[in-house]
């Protein structure tokens, strides 16, 4: 330490009774959360057959379109499949609840009224709660008991820019940036423990809450594949199909020339 | 046979999807006798499933029952074990009993693809082809991406001489696996059998075109020999009766069909130029010259 810096001496008791406990509690809560989430996760709900059919109908068109520019199937077959799908999308043959009745505008499905979607959302919310509640409690605990504590000194110098990151909760303008406050130590752990969890619990662990914090329960993974307006999706897919029909080119169209050229029977085309 | 090497071999069979039931059974019994299946971890259960199927194949149902008992205790409600049980029943019970069992499973979970496929296979086996085709069509309407299912459908159609329908089914296989030359070969051969020779010719040529490893200096091997034979057969027919040939798919006959015919003759003869082909070469040449 340079001579002119004001030395600060940390009581070793702070290390034993504040620094280690905070770290330990956060690690243990991470493990606990992993197992609680595993317990809370209900088995993925089985979709009824009609719903699977509806969901996968789009994939059919996508598979057809994927190879359209170099399609393996001859033109007649291609157009017949393409027309069939387009027709089916237009009449709604693949819709879960059968073709739409009447000509009233189909209301976008409301996730609050669809019980299946509601279940998915509840599951997401439950997971969120398990993530949030312990973090809030730990933060409250640190704020209540250890507010303004300086816990640790980093062994390397840092620029002033890190002050707000490392000394949250301590409003001193001239303290060396290397000192870390209790609240900042909490945040460092909060964002930095994922590596440890991954080491102990494996790659797909659920202990890290810093990632799930950013995801809202309404847009979370559980509901991302949830309610979708298939009527609209099918309509869009019909346009795509038409578009692909323009792109369509059979792989076998000039294949004889290609093969003849490959074997040197035809002059190469330049 | 050490336990370790047996396990390794079985694992490699699983990853490569090899169905060498005799070998799997021989090695599997060693592992099963050692009683170590429970502490193999997750691999142990995959191994038991593998051994179950292999032992049914070789007809040692006592071993099958042992495996199924262990699996059933560990996974009481697993649909996968249900299917294994069904396959076990197919070995001994009457088809109607098995069908009832599968119906029951389907009622519980209408979207169980594995059970559905087993049901279709039983229906086909007992000769209710019509019902099997109907079920298979419904299955494929829901699970479109099942290339195996489409192949099976094509096979059923072909067995009933419905080659055009088989072609339709194979077209879906082509869409699903556009990188598989064997699918193209099957499509070409089915088209040939259906009488659509120009289409068959094109598809045989695609098979050749897909094969990057061969050019004019190499000897055709494996799939390309078959494809070249196909090209030769088609071009020979087309040269004889070009104008009168109508193709159901409106495929045009290539204008340089003579060149293709020459090339095919040359390639087929090359295929028989190696040491193994010496005896048959004269036969092939006779066939080539006599038209």
Image (cartoon, coloured by chain):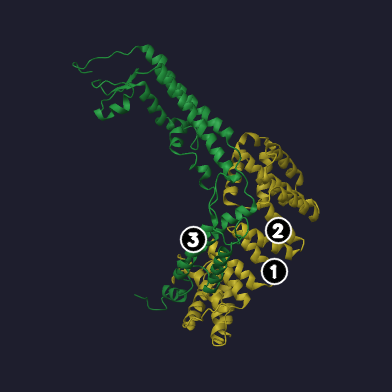
Chain colours: A green, B yellow
A233 is higher (above) or lower (below) than B71 = below
**B81 or B131, which is in the foreground?**
B131
Query: Which quadrant would the N terminus of chain B be assigned to in this image?
Result: top right
Residue at which label 2 appears: B120
Report how far apart the C-alphas of labels 1 and 3 lie in the structure: 39 Å
Residue at 54% x, 74% y: name it. A76
Label drawn at residue A177: none
> B286 above or below A166?
below
Secondary element at image label 3: helix
| Residue B7 sits in quarter | top right
Left/right placement of residue B260 relative to residue B54 reads left
What's the mark number on residue A236?
A: 3
Number of residues whose C-alpha sits closer than 10 Å to that of mark 3, classed few (under 14), some (14–19) or many (20 or more)? few
Alpha-carbon neighbours of circle 2 within 10 Å: few (<14), some, or many (≥20)? many
Q: Earlier in the sequence, mark 2 or mark 1?
A: 2
Q: Residue at x 69, y 42 (%)?
A: B29
Q: Can residue A120 be seen by looking at this rendering?
A: yes
In the image shown, does B215 or A232 lie closer to the viewer? A232
| Spatial CA span between label 2 and label 3 | 35 Å
Where in the figure is residue B221, as x and y percent of width and height?
Answer: 52, 67
Please state the horizontal and vertical placement of residue A38, each as a whole percent of the image.
56, 34
Q: Name the image quarter holding residue B284.
A: bottom right
């Amino acid at each position: 330490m340079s001579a002119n810096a004001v030395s600060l001496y940390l009581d070793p008791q702070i290390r034993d009774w504040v620094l280690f406990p905070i770290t330990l509690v956060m690690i243990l809560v991470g493990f606990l959360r992993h197992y609680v989430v595993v317990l809370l996760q209900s088995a993925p709900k089985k979709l009824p057959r009609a719903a699977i059919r509806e969901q996968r109908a789009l994939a059919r068109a996508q598979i057809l379109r994927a190879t359209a520019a170099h399609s393996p199937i001859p033109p007649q077959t291609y157009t017949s499949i393409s027309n069939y799908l387009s027709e089916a999308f237009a009449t709604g043959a693949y819709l879960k609840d059968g073709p739409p009745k009447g000509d009233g505008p189909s209301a976008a499905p409301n996730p609050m009224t669809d019980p299946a979607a509601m279940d998915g959302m509840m599951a997401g919310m439950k997971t969120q709660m398990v993530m949030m509640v312990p973090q809030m409690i730990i933060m409250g605990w640190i704020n209540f008991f250890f507010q303004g504590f300086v816990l640790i000194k980093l062994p390397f110098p840092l620029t002033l820019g890190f002050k707000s990151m490392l000394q949250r909760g301590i409003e001193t303008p001239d303290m060396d940036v290397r000192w870390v406050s209790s609240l900042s130590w909490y945040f460092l752990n909060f964002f930095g423990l994922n590596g440890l969890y991954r080491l102990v619990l494996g790659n797909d662990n659920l202990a890290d809450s810093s990632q799930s914090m950013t995801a809202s329960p309404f847009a979370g993974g559980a509901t991302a594949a949830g309610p979708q307006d298939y009527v609209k999706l099918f309509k869009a897919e019909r346009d795509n199909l038409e578009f692909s029909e323009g792109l369509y080119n059979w792989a076998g169209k000039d294949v004889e020339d290609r093969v003849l050229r490959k074997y040197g029977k035809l002059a190469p085309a330049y | 046979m050490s336990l370790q090497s047996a396990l390794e071999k079985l694992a490699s069979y699983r990853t490569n999807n090899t169905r060498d039931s005799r070998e799997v059974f021989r090695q599997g019994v060693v592992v099963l006798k050692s009683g170590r299946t429970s502490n193999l971890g997750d691999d142990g259960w995959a191994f038991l499933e593998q051994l179950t199927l292999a032992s049914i194949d070789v007809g040692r149902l006592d071993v099958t029952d042992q495996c199924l008992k262990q699996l059933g205790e560990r996974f009481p409600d697993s649909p996968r074990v249900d299917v294994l049980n069904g396959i076990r029943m197919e070995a001994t019970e009457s088809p109607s009993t098995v069908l009832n069992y599968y119906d029951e499973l389907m009622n519980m979970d209408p979207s169980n693809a594995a059970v559905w496929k087993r049901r279709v296979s039983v229906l086909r086996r007992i000769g209710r082809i019509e019902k099997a085709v109907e079920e298979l069509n419904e299955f494929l309407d829901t699970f479109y991406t099942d290339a195996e299912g489409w192949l099976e459908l094509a096979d059923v159609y072909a067995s009933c001489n419905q080659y055009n329908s088989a072609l339709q089914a194979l077209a879906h296989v082509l869409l699903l696996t556009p990188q598989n030359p064997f699918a193209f070969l099957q499509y070409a051969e089915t088209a040939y059998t259906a009488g659509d020779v120009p289409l068959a010719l094109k598809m045989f040529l695609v098979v050749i075109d897909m094969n990057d490893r061969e050019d004019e200096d190499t000897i055709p091997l494996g799939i390309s020999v078959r494809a070249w034979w196909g090209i030769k057969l088609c071009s020979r027919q087309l040269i004889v009766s070009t104008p009168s040939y109508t193709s159901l798919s409106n495929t045009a006959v290539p204008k340089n069909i003579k060149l293709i015919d020459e090339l095919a003759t040359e390639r087929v003869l090359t295929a028989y130029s190696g040491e193994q082909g010496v005896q048959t070469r004269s036969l092939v040449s006779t066939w080539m010259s006599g038209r």
